[in-house]
Amino acid sequence: MSFLKKRRKNSVKRPLFEQDDQNMETNKELLKTSLQENIQHVKQLLGNSSDIVIREIQIGKKQLVKVCIFYTDGLVDTNSIQNFIMESIMLDIHTGQEQILSSQQNILQQLKDCILAVGDIRDVTEFSSLLTSLLSGDVILLVDGHAQGFTIGMRGGKDRGVMEATTETIIRGPKEGFTEKLRTNTALIRRKIKTPQLWLESKKIGKLTITDVGIMYINGIVNDKVVEEVHRRLDRIDIDGILESGYIEELIQDETYSPFPTIYYSERPDVVAAELLEGKVAILVDGTPIVLVVPGLFVSFIQSSEDYYQRTFFSSLNRMLRFFCILIALLGPSVYIALTTFHQEMLPTPLLIGLAAQREGVPFPAFIEALLMEIGFEILREAGLRMPRAIGPAMSIVGTLVIGTAAVDAGIVSAAMVIVVAITAVASFVLPSYAISQSFRMLRFPFMALAASFGLFGILVGFIALVLHMCSLRSFEVPYMSPFAPFIREDIKDTVIRVPIWRMFSRPRIISQKNNKRVQSSAPKPPRNNM
Amino acid sequence: MKRSFTMFIILIVFLLFTAGCWNRRELNELAVTLAIGLDKTSDDQYLLTAQVVNPGEVAGDRGAGSSPVIIYSAKGKTVSEAIRKITDESPRRIYPSHLRVLVIGESLAKEGIGKPLDLFSREWDMRSDFYIVVAKGMDAKNILKVPTALEKIPANKLFNTLSLSSKVWSGTSAITLDELITDMVSEGKQPVLTGIQADIKGDEETSLSKQNVERIDMPARLSYNGLAVFDKDKLVGWLNEKQSQTYTVVTSKEKSTVVDVSCPKGGKFVYQVMSSNTEMKGKIKNGKPEIDLNVHVEGNISEVECPIDLTKTESIDQLEEIYEKTSKKVFKKAIKQVQEEYKTDIFGFGEAIHRADPQAWKKLKKDWAKHFENVPVNIRVQGEIRSIGTIDNPFQEKLK
């Protein structure tokens, strides 16, 4: 152990990108007055990258002024550049009034005020911000003789467009899902919640990727402490790149070494909007359709947006079904192992004989048998996700053969075990959130080991330990298991059952105490028919 | 903190592997024993016979045509010794948790069943909900040898037949280990057990083989027959059918049965008992014990073989009255016979006296067997007819 310590000491805090840090320093320098110098400098900083388009133009009627346009090919809307920048400064000037571009001094102001028919124009004076804007898809316009330029918002280029959410499918409810573009995603949420209280704060995270991150919440409902905490945790991030919201999740979550996710995520705008209305904070990351929601509580992972669109009875039954499925997914194989290897007296006699008959000739103990089948299933699941689409049908045929009749006929596993493993596998996918179903699928392996060693006693001890662990978790200072532990009677309304919408008077207590009232009593009152 | 946590996890993992799966038994390492037979051999040893299920034959369609059960037997000076010794023969450990029936050979029952039963109530692998029966006039091993049809496993046949017949006919009594022991140790009540008989016709070679179940009229059969009367733990005699039924009525064990009663103008009708409850009260009259039995029976008319107008309430009352009289006579006679012939208090009259007058019981209990013989029993039967079935008057009348 001691040599590990030494190594750890040696590797203490060596900045990963020392060179890079220096680069950043140099970029702080200001623009020069000479256009040529500026162009040269930009070219040098970007290493002559071929996707940077640098277009030098001369404009004006009497005096010609040198102007240069920079943009990154593919990130900008080329049509708009043609129509609103090029055309304006090269053609429209000649048809316009005389005094335009007559004097050099206020040429920048004139361009901004009278010529460029574009909404989003900002001044730029430093190379660093110039480069950031350029590489984010803005158009840069520099004028000779001025140590100043514009960034013109012309972001465009190809993106996927709003499509149906693929990871969370429902029958009733909006079909749209988030896209990879941050701006589209914020718009999708704004379209659902139009109150001016819906606030969006932005950050750039990742030294090299400089990823846009948006923090969205409803002011007046959200707990300000949580927002502050989100800011604090995001600001602490010091990393080269953020490629997906998973990076952010790992960097800001409360507990890394827990099987349970403490940050909720969704691909559906309606889900995120609902969470915002409960007083939670959404973290949107550019480049991924997955939006994080904090604080992430256990119940969130059991709720599906469809629960609120369906009739209340079915929703409540579905909720109960999900909790039941958690138990099956977690304990299915382990209870089977415990019963068949330790507690045979608990089985009804005909069942015992039936199971014993199936086990005749099975070479492995029940634990190994279950382990084989479970691992077999996990392999199939993972392969099903990773393999090329075209192999799918072949794969499913092989899969049904492996975990199925062939294995039983070959006498390697018993038929009952196939049933147990199959029902466990299906039950784990009943949960609307893939993140939590992963947790329970993983946890069933230790439970199987406990069952094989200590029987039901082991399962019980393991379950107690699991519950203790879950109750000890916190997400952004909110207890993970609330409203079960701490128990909040009012908030049970949206957990194991889902009461009618008009009975959900208040927002979850534990998340934010502010502005708690949700619905006035608005129970439907159909007129009495006196006819 | 983090290191100690890691160490903790590592220790847990070690624990899992070093615990060695204590007490783990795979299903295919068990000899699921559904019936055990106990006999006494001539050299004063126990002969234990275990009827073990051959699971592959019973369930699933992979049967190879061998017998659904196998019997293993071993001798031993104690029951435990015999059970362990079975492994000389059996490839798997005897697993008795699912035991349905314990058959005791008549010769052992006559010597006393108290000692061998200790293991069955002490061993934690055993549940106490199995039935105990006595092999009437034969060894228990012979009972367990008989192949049965319908229920492939003979032990299940024994169990189901007994629980059914005790419910529907009430000539038998399904007695479990805990009930037996309670009665055995009670001073004011003696146990009974149902008798089982194997009726083997013809050649044993064929009738005790699979061919038995291939015949429609099976040459070898198992059937229950009467109750065995015990004095403490020793068998003293057998009750006939009427006495057995009286026993179940008096001890309130009767669930349902049918009784044939004569009609007022000749012929018979059948009274079907649906529920029966007996109140037993003891009392001391002039220093002598006395028993009052209050039998309350509800039932239907299930068969009428005589001319009678059932549409009239008077005739129903009449029938009730006749039933009450007849059954009172039957009960009285049967109780008298038990008192005189066996002199053991299987009805629990002693307990009733004990409940009624504990002081008097203290004096009586020493030689209760003698008192029991002469206890006068006052019986009152109250029979009610609830329904007469789907037709009213018997149609035989119109045949004339």
Image (cartoon, coloured by chain):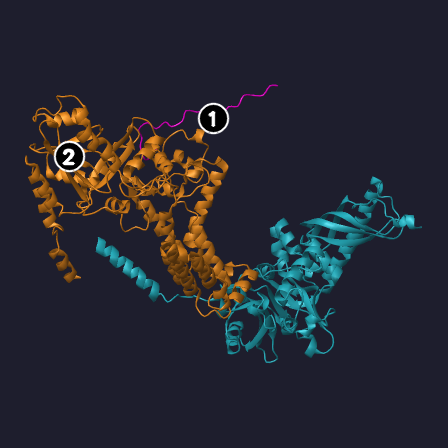
Residue nearer the viewer, A530 or B15: A530
Which of the 4 quarters of the picture holds residue B232?
Answer: bottom right
Under mark 1, the amino acid is: Ala
Q: Which residue is mark 2?
A: A141
Q: Which residue is mark 1?
A: A523
Residue nearer the viewer, A295 or B79: A295
Asked if residue A329 lies left or right of residue B263, the reply is: left
Under mark 2, the amino acid is: Leu
> How many numbered discs sit on the rendered protein?
2
Which label lies toward us, 2 or 1?
Answer: 2
Asked if residue B383 lies left or right of residue A28, the reply is: right
The image shows residue B174, relative to residue A475, as above or below, that is: below
The N terminus of chain A sits in image quarter: bottom left
Residue at horizontal 44%, vertical 48%?
A: A430
Residue B243 in view in this figure: yes
Q: Main secondary structure of the magenta part?
A: loop
